[in-house]
Image (tube, rainbow, N blue to C red):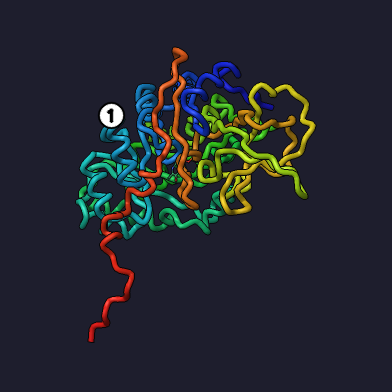
């Protein structure tokens, strides 16, 4: 069981809405900081612990700056994400560049920033060398294939496009060393939204065993292993959050069993968690603007799937509350929908909720990661802005709502006015 809470009273929320309108995302700085501290505390039993926050989960530089203040770095996978991390003051090896199918100019910028480049494939060694040169520190991404069972969202590692095979890793590290790399790391990411801590502990065990093998076969000693992201959050009321202490203890036990006897202590433990860092501490707040009663009962919000794609894309569950009616009996059954011309634009399907009146504020929970970040502009939808509830109770806008001008920013209407729709004469 977990409690779904919201950090503002109905009166406070109405006040915020009167200033900013709806829809908007709201993030709770205090809760994000407390969560970051709980993670650091739990993992302090492991040597060289470091969290590179996966920027893709919540790519807002204000949030990154808060996380940097808590001692976290960033995990980036594109040039704009690298630039966001840089703007937030995250520097050098605090940045992990875990990309795939990477263009040359992005490798170049990552190297220029001093980020730890995490190669996705053995052919990327030569590609990186040609693009930017081989850096002193380098990481390789491991795809354990059949060694690791599948996870519901990310699927079986064997079918995933990421990473080196086990055999390729040995060859890869050897080649990297020959090309001048001096410091080595190993990464994997084989989970998404996984709540079972045993799954994450097993991942650590697989990396630890590889670290020992690599040392024994090639005398290459890893500086750290990165367990990737994929720590789950309890979207549903009957799920339990990950117990950080139990997870850290489980990883520590595997470390003591595998790394210590091999003489490889200390080996750093890094994470690239995204969702679990901010997911539960963000909400999408919208207003009910329509109700319709046909074969089913519908509530139409002023937010859409363009603001929060997960329910429409994955059928993902997000808890929904109606401000001021949190304790009202769920007497109605609704499909809660957005305005996209796509029938999967539904935040909830056949959900039992209290009676919703027009103008009610509808709060969608657990939207602090992979929420605004996955938004899009299909159907000309303009994405919601983002507000930060600071620890002193003040509200700070950290991204404004999109405007029609933003939507048109890549178009040149003056060229359009000069453009003749008559077909140009054919060249002979
Ligand atoms: C998505 C991703 C993450 C973060 O995943 P979460 O599920 O948000 O923790 C970390 N690393 C890589 C390489 C990713 O693709």
**Rendered view: 271 above or below 28:** below
Left or right of 315 in this view: 159: left
Mark 1, Cα crowd under 10 Å, few <14 / some 14-19 / many 20+, is some
Considering every residue shown, the one lying at the far right of the view is 331
- Give me the residue at 29% from left, 68% from top: 420
Left or right of 420 in this view: 47: right
Q: Is mark 1 within 8 Å of ligand 1?
A: no
Considering every residue shown, the one lying at the far bottom of the view is 428
Name the one closer to the observer, 381 or 198. Answer: 381
Quadrant (top left, top right, bottom left, bottom right) of the N terminus: top right
- Give me the residue at 72% from left, 39% from top: 351
Q: Where's residue 250, x and y in %?
A: 55, 31
Considering every residue shown, the one lying at the far top of the view is 392
| Quadrant of the image occupied by residue 327 | top right
Name the one closer to the observer, 425 or 133. Answer: 425
Name the one closer to the observer, 171 or 260. Answer: 171
Q: How many marks can you see?
A: 1
User: Label 1's element?
Assistant: loop
| Quadrant of the image occupied by residue 338 | top right
- Give me the residue at 54% from left, 34% from top: 367
Q: Where's residue 31, x and y in %?
A: 50, 21
- Give me the residue at 47% from left, 23% from top: 19
| Quadrant of the image occupied by residue 11 | top right
Quadrant (top left, top right, bottom left, bottom right) of the C terminus: bottom left
Q: Is residue 216 visible?
A: no
Q: Is residue 296 visible?
A: yes
Q: Where's residue 406, x and y in %?
A: 36, 44
Q: Where's residue 2, x and y in %?
A: 66, 26
Q: Which residue is mark 1?
A: 89
């Amino acid at each position: 069981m977990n409690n779904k809470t919201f950090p503002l009273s109905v009166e406070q929320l109405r006040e915020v809405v009167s200033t900013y309108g709806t829809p908007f995302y709201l993030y709770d700085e205090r809760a994000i900081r407390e969560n970051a501290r709980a993670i650091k505390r739990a993992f302090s039993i492991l040597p060289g612990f470091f969290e590179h926050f996966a920027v893709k989960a919540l790519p807002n530089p204000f949030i990154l700056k808060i996380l940097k203040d808590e001692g976290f770095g960033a995990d980036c996978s594109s040039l704009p994400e690298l630039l966001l991390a840089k703007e937030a003051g995250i520097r050098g090896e605090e940045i992990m560049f875990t990309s795939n199918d990477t263009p040359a100019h992005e490798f170049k910028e990552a190297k220029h920033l001093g980020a730890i480049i995490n190669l996705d494939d053995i052919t990327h060694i030569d590609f990186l060398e040609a693009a930017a040169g081989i850096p002193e520190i380098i990481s390789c991404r491991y795809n354990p294939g059949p060694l690791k069972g599948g996870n519901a969202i990310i699927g079986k590692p064997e079918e995933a496009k990421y990473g080196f095979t086990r055999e390729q890793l040995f060859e890869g590290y050897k080649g990297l060393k020959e090309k001048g790399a001096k410091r080595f790391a190993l990464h994997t990411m084989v989970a998404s939204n996984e709540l079972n801590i045993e799954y994450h502990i097993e991942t650590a065990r697989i990396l630890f065993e590889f670290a020992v093998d690599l040392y024994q076969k090639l005398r290459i000693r890893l500086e750290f292993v990165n367990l990737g992201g994929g720590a789950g959050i309890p979207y549903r009321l009957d799920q339990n959050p990950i117990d950080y202490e139990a997870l850290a203890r489980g990883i520590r036990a595997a470390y003591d069993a595998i790394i210590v006897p091999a003489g490889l202590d200390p080996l750093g433990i890094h994470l690239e968690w995204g969702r679990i860092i901010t997911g539960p501490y963000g909400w999408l707040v919208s207003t009910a603007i329509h109700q319709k009663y046909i074969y089913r009962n519908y509530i139409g919000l002023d937010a859409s799937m363009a603001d929060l794609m997960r329910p429409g894309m994955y059928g993902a569950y997000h808890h929904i509350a109606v401000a001021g009616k949190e304790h009202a009996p769920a007497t109605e059954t609704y499909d809660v929908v957005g305005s996209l011309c796509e029938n999967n634009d539904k935040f909830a399907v056949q959900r039992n909720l209290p009676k919703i009146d027009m103008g009610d504020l509808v709060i969608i929970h657990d939207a602090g990661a992979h929420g605004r970040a996955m938004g899009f502009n299909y159907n000309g939808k303009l994405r919601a802005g983002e507000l930060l509830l600071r620890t002193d109770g003040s509200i700070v806008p950290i991204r404004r709502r999109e405007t029609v001008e933003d939507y048109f920013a890549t178009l040149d209407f003056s060229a359009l006015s000069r453009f003749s729709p008559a077909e140009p004469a054919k060249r002979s």
